[in-house]
Image (cartoon, rainbow, N blue to C red):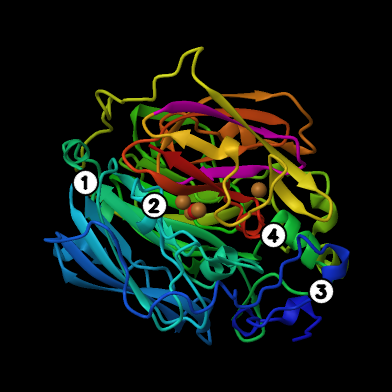
Amino acid sequence: MNDIDPARRTLLRRIGGTTVATALFPGLLLSACGNGTSAGTRSATAARHGLERGPFDVDLRLRAQPGTAPILPGTPSEVWRYTAELRNGPADTVAPVGDSYTGPLIRLRRGQRFRARLENGLPEDTTVHWHGLHVPPDVDGQPRLPIKPGEAMTVAFEVRDRAGLYWYHPHPHGPDGGRVGFQSYAGLTGPLVIEDESERSLGLPAGDQEMILVLQDRSFAGDNELTYIGSGMGTMMRRMRGFLGDRVLVNGQPDAVREVATRPYRLRLVNGSNSRIYKLAWSDGRPMTVLGTDGGLLTAPLKQPFVTLAPAQRIDLWLDLSSSEPGDELRLLSQGYQAGMMNGMMGGGMMGDMMGGSELPAGARFPLLTLRVTRRESGGEPLPERLVDNLQTPAVNRDTLVRRFELGMAMMRGFTINGRRFEGTNVADDEVVRLGDTEIWEFANDTMMPHPMHVHGLQFTVVGRQQTGGRHGWGGLEDGLVDAGWHDTVLVLPGERVRIALTFEDFEGLYMYHCHNMEHEDAGMMRYYRVRA
Ligand code: C2O
Ligand code: CU
Ligand code: CU
């Protein structure tokens, strides 16, 4: 393949890859072709990991395959999408999320024994990663356990996590680089909710008053074809920065509108974008009321003017429309912020395109969702003053081991963690932790870009952050950070040192940690770590 016109390349015809600019940046510019993972060594039978035997409370079939979805008016777009079929379990375990490509909402209850048969109907390897869940390593959907085209894998685990919004997405990585960015961009992203008793007792808005919202940006060509990172001049820049689309979609729809009543709502957002960071705000300037983060509810609601939501992060918001009137409109916005010194030069147009620019650059201000009040309704519980009685956090003190991770950028080699790129399951001595230990991990970012750092297999708390280096033209995102509560992904801004506390419980073996800017992780800003008993 040798297309050289980045803007015209369509997503699903790109399988086959390209090498146009490789010579400029060989280590970083990874071809987009089907990843030839260690060919043919896995058997064609379904493998089983985690829980070995039933009974199972939930049994489902989750299939990834090509299809079409209506996104923009006119021709439906070609996408890759998840479909689910519930074979056993409570009827509300699986529900569609809009009518576009977004994967179905999977709703689980803490304590359930869950089993899924994962079927790969794609023309390349894939995996299903349960982002944020505390599950055994072999059912975590890591790249070392790919599902080949036409094959299936059965995974089963106990749902141990706190109530919260999690999500699932592919995690394949072959010798030519990662395919997380491509596959999730093609449409393979779905939300997963865990419920538990203590959350249910709060009586938070549910049913029509609960909105699950997946935020993503996409670009389109000619006949509504999705386009990903092209292959021309701008490719190198686009990969460095991460993909930015021209249109922002909510649950796979542009210009999202919801009709609402005069009552309280719960909005649960996941940033499923490849690289875009949102600075969320309400159009009427009211504060955002935060109920929870990646790993579930906070001790008490938190009010702040903005919420910064980096790729892979979730936020749980309370919105009371009781004092609105029919006819009112409220918009959820992404507020403007400064996104680096290069950003202005990388706008749209031909020059911008060569520089890897987007019509909707990082830091642009735009609406995400319009809430249109159409009816008066009373009722709904008031905002609880306390959400969680006894929020456990990892116990750290001055003797807690601090493990340091330097986020780096190496010319010709892309982004690195402690100077290393992804090396498959190779784990360095300083990437081995002990089962049961609590540690502090410090991410030090001296690059020119923010990195949303994600750790698999657990939730952590943010101990602190410090600005010690240059901001490199980034500004404004710091106003919206939510560091309270439990997280699996933390944004590390340029010049920052961010410390998190984590405990490695229950499972031993290989997990991953990486930047969740999907283009960064695909380019190798990702490593395995090992939990050793
Ligand atoms: Cu969404 Cu490796 O993660
Ligand atoms: Cu993950
Ligand atoms: Cu990054």
Q: Would you say 405 lies left or right of 193 here?
A: right
Which residue range is magenta in the image?
437-456
Q: Is residue 441 magenta?
A: yes
Residue 360 — which label? 4
Q: Earlier in the sequence, mark 3 or mark 1?
A: 1
Pick the residue in front: 424 or 522.
424
Q: Main secondary structure of the magenta part?
A: strand
- The residue mark sitting in front, 2 or 1, is 2
Q: CA distance from mark 2 to mark 4?
A: 38 Å
Residue 298: in magenta span: no
- The number of callouts visible is 4
Residue 110 is marked as 1
Instruction: State how far apart marks 2 and 1 are (Cα).
Output: 19 Å
Looking at the image, which residue sits at the far left? 55
State left or right for residue 112 relative to residue 83. left
Tag 3, which secondary structure?
Answer: loop
Q: Secondary structure at mark 4?
A: loop
Q: Position of residue 412 (x, y in %)?
A: 83, 56
Q: Tag on residue 137?
A: 2
Q: Give the mark, 3 or 2, whose residue is nearer the N terminus.
A: 2
